[in-house]
Amino acid sequence: MLEKLFNIFKELDKLTFKIMTYGLKFCFVICIFSVLILVTYSLFVFSPFLYYIGLSLFRLSIIFGIEFVICGLVVDGIKKQVI
């Protein structure tokens, strides 16, 4: 099962793979920013507003990361006329 998943990622179109990697890097930057906000909340400021912003950004980065992977796989399948 894992070998099949790894083969799917190895056989991705170069442009699709490039877009996926840039998208995941963008999501990682958003995730780091949200973690910094949550650490600031934890150490210095105890404002619920800051906590909810950090938590929302963290959830957003995870959702975007999943969307980039799923949409990349679907677009690659459409390009190869598998789907």
Image (tube, grey):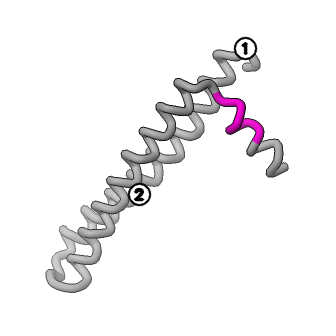
What is the three-letter code of the residue carrying label 1? Gln
Residue 9 is covered by the magenta coloring: yes
Q: Nearer the viewer, mark 2 or mark 1?
A: 1
> Which is nearer the eye, 77 or 18?
18
Residue 67 is covered by the magenta coloring: no
Q: Establish if 27 lies above or below 38.
A: above
Residue stretch rendered in magenta on the structure: 7-12
Q: Position of residue 77 (x, y in %)?
A: 68, 23
Q: Position of residue 10 (x, y in %)?
A: 70, 37
Q: Establish if 79 lies above or below 54.
A: above
Q: Secondary structure at mark 2?
A: helix
Can you say which quadrant of the picture contains the C terminus?
top right
In the displayed structure image, the side of residue 74 where residue 1 appears, left or right: right
**Label 1 sits on residue:** 81
**Label 2 sits on residue:** 59
Q: Position of residue 36 (x, y in %)?
A: 27, 69
Q: Position of residue 55 (x, y in %)?
A: 34, 65
Characterize the local packing of mark 2: few (<14), some (14-19) or many (20 or more) Cα atoms within 10 angstroms: some
